[in-house]
Amino acid sequence: METYLARYCKGAKLVRYADDLVVIHPERKGIEQAQRLLSKWLQKMGLALKPSKTRICHTLNPVDGQVGFDFLGFSVRQYRMSKYRSGRSMKGYKTIIQPSKAAMQRHVQRLQDVVRSHKAAPQAALIHHLNPIIRGWSAYYSAQCSKKAYSRLDYLLYQKLRAWAHRRHPNKTGYWRTSRYWLVNQGEGWVFAAGHGNQRVCLCTHVETPVVRHIKVQGNRSPLDGDWSYWATRMGKHPELPTQIAKLLQRQRGKCSNCELYFRSEDLLEVHHVDGNHQNHKWDNLALLHQHCHDQVHSGMRDQHPVVEEPCEVIALQISARTYHRDESA
């Protein structure tokens, strides 16, 4: 489908997942042409685009009263702003991808169903049922602009839990219910928790999930292409690379911690102990350096730990400086 559309509709980009797809084109005529081509292509297999789920929209200007589109639970649209705040493009607008309203409503409804189904259940049982749902939903949206949605969901969940506590103890005061089910009066904040000490079970919140921007994988890359240096730096692991080296590559983003230059294919690398103690293998004490950088660091440095150790392992890594520069800017 992608090859067919690219051949007959210049400039069109198709994003497909299972039976859902989005076609992006800078002009409306291109979108209409792509729609006709896709309808013709699907017709040969006895399929057709569903009219109720097919529409033409614009990510910046309203079309039929709607701006942007929803895809796989995400809302994609652009917002006007100063060219100095619009990023590198400086075009006067910025693209923001965040959880869609429909996805948030479904999630809130699911949380509400769980709370209602545990009216008479112990607090710990309710927490055990809610935590996997909260973690899974938050992890799915953690690569986009989701902090505002996380805060909104935590507020709505708190309201449902407060109603849950009031239903169980209608004759108690709000202070008593708060002390019974939350830790705020113990100086530990608004944490919905059950039990004491090592047996305590706490409810997860959506905002606890960090938002980490996704770095686009280069188009010519594949986990099976044998380039272990690229994937080790990206993922922090690779079957052909020691775990320590892979994690250091990921933490340093493919750069030497001394000269801050990207490692090249012909470079030799050494694991450096920052405090000079080769017995201290804590991650904060380890750094990956070029061999010549490692020699420079130790040239005027006296070892204060008279423990005879074997030289650091020297590993040749095939890492392209240009490759990682492009990956960082993707």
Image: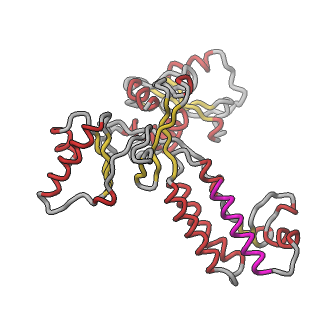
Residue 163 image point, x, y percent: 73, 72
Residue 23 image point, x, y percent: 30, 44
Name the residue rendered at 60%, 35% in the picture. 286
Residue 88 image point, x, y percent: 48, 24
Q: Is residue 275 depicted above or below 196 in this figure?
A: above
Residue 311 appears in the picture as rendered: no
Q: Main secondary structure of the magenta part?
A: helix
Name the residue rendered at 56%, 69% in the picture. 109
Residue 323 image point, x, y percent: 38, 28
Q: Is residue 18 left or right of residue 298?
A: left
The residue at the far bottom in this view is 120
Q: How is colour applied across the structure in the image?
A: secondary structure
The residue at the far front in this view is 64
The image quadrant of residue 25 is top left
The quarter of the image holding the C terminus is top left
**184 or 278: nearer the eye?**
184
Q: Is residue 133 left or right of residue 161?
A: left
Q: Is residue 156 depicted above or below 238 in this figure?
A: below
Q: Is residue 125 depicted above or below 266 in this figure?
A: below
The image quadrant of residue 227 is top left
Is residue 135 inside the magenta stretch?
A: no
Name the residue rendered at 14%, 63% in the picture. 46
Residue 298 appears in the picture as rendered: yes
Name the residue rendered at 66%, 71% in the picture. 127
Q: Is residue 158 left or right of residue 289?
A: right
Give, as a single range, the part of the protein colored magenta: 152-169
